[in-house]
Amino acid sequence: MNKESFDACLLLTLPQDVFAVISRFLSPSDICNLILCGKSICALVDSEKTWLVQCEVVKVIPLIEIVQWRIGISSYKVLCRFLVEVVKPLVGIWVQENPELGNVVYVMPGFLSVVGCRIIPQKVGPLWFQEGQLVWSPVFEIICGSDGSTGFFLHGRDKEGSCLYPGFVMGIEKSCNELLLEVEPIEIEREDSRKELSGKINEGGVPFGNLAFSDRRSLLDIVTNHVSVRVGEPLRGMLFPTRSKDDDAMMLERRTMLLKILKFGGNSKHLKLEENEQLCYNHIQIHINKLSENLGDDIDDMEDIEDQREVTPKKKSFSRFLRSGIKHILGKSSSSKIKPPSSSEIRQSFLSSGDTFGLSLKASCTELDSYEGWPIMCANSFSLYKLPMKNPVDNQEYAGLWGGTFGWPPGKYIEGKALFLLMLTYGESEDGSERVLFGTKILEGNGFAERPNGSSMFVANIDTPSLEPFPFDTDGRYFEQSYMGEGIADGYGFRYPGSKPGSLFVISNDLLAFVWQETKDVITLQRVNLAEILKKGLGSCVPPLPPTMNFTYTERSYTNVFTKSSTYSSSSE
């Protein structure tokens, strides 16, 4: 017997409990590879105990929640796949450049789901969220069915109240950094023998992102208006458990109602949900004829669209071959005169690629440039962008999300102070000689934006100690270290701020304070764990905006657009 066969035999003699312990040193992909090695190894490896351990290995939810989530899903293997393919890539902080006060969407685990919560610009008291509540509003959620299939819900509101807008999850890349809200064309497959219809996503048509911005906005508004489902309790709240005694029962009830909406539509209260069947989406799609009626004059010629739809793939490929042959015969001079397709032609081609259309969410990985830790974003895109968030390590111990207010000492001022959320990231100085720490503003709680969204509130030279003394009474606190730096200041208008010298002080009990040397202004920061705050019940939910605006607010604004009014306003305002 060779060594490999002998090792395999030893592996097969292990009890499942022992292998489950060993599997902690393996990844889910390692387990999948072992399963493919043979029936005997598969019988040992592909067990509930092993996949329970793998759910822990993923490290996105604690063991107690893993066990709770198992109640609503067929196996730990299915749960592990959902954690790896959906939860882990999406959890984190997503941002948009508008409005200037900040647009922060925190994505966190819910209950067999991931939920996107917008943190609203706000003021806090001296005891932070212990005496008040973190104000937030729902943006979207992705829920997992019993078989691992996923469904997407966009949150929003219409003239009469809060609504849900069901749709599809079109793909989540493991290293995704862009979250896109789109309209997806779907082809209807007809089975003549049984006269049944089923939907198939069209993957070969014109991408939604190629449409003009006005067309994309119109299509999103039309589709969301068609698929909307008005909701009350418990659908309006309870996106995630808050450690209450009644949480489990309420979360299970809410999840069942959401699955029924995905499968049967809004009028599904008294229908039974067969957990072993995949989710069905026919009712959350809008037919091409209905879509054209709503678009009205925006469509130049619907007959052209119908003609395009009647062309089979073979005829399309032949026509492309014929056109390319004619171009080759006519030569480069004539081909150079061919005009690019107009926006109306692109729109017609997109509409001709599906029989029905639905709302979709896509998480992709794209190359993004950044400046001082802030991604350079596409202005006219219905998307959110993920901020890289590193856990503190030995040489980057200050990295992560921090929150704070202006003033010293913390808790001195009774009146509400504007909450600032800063993402601290490490980089290098312009000449590459020093390590620097960027304090990038991602949320500002003032009534009017004082600094641009994504600007650096301070830049500290981590390799250069500061000799400046702390200008205030230490309030009995121990100051561990201080670094030289520069803080944001008035510059050439709002868009191009300047900077002035200052110092970053590292204080005991996990506090930071940056002091502007000339003005003696001080911003005091402490680490913020948004998931812990929300799950402790220290959050206060406010109504969302209309659906498309609730996902991406595309208009330039310097005020708090998220709490101006809970009444309906159209996206065209």
Image (spheres, rainbow, N blue to C red):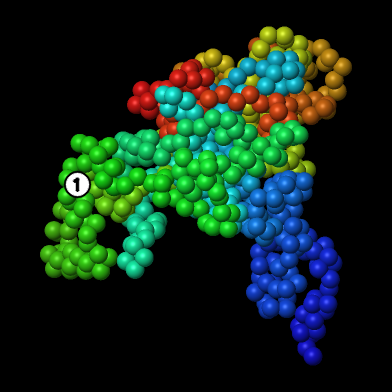
Q: Looking at the image, is 539 positioned above or below residue 298?
A: above
Q: Position of residue 439 (x, y in %)?
A: 63, 30
Q: Looking at the image, is 477 positioned above or below residue 153?
A: above
Q: Residue at x 26, y 45 (%)?
A: 289
Q: Which residue is mark 1?
A: 302
Q: Residue at x 49, y 20 (%)?
A: 566
Q: Residue at x 54, y 30 (%)?
A: 232
Answer with left or right where residue 165 lies relative to residue 226.
Answer: right
Q: Position of residue 48 (x, y in %)?
A: 74, 62
Answer with left or right where residue 262 lies relative to residue 471.
Answer: left
Quarter of the image containing the C terminus?
top left
Q: Looking at the image, is 97 positioned above or below residue 324?
A: above
Q: Residue at x 69, y 66 (%)?
A: 30
Label 1: few (<14), some (14–19) or many (≥20) C-alpha neighbours in 10 Å? some
The answer to whether any part of residue 205 appears in the image is: yes
Secondary structure beneath disc 1? helix
Give the amino acid type for the residue marked by disc 1 in the picture: Met
Front-most of residues 56 and 52: 52
Front-most of residues 124 and 39: 39
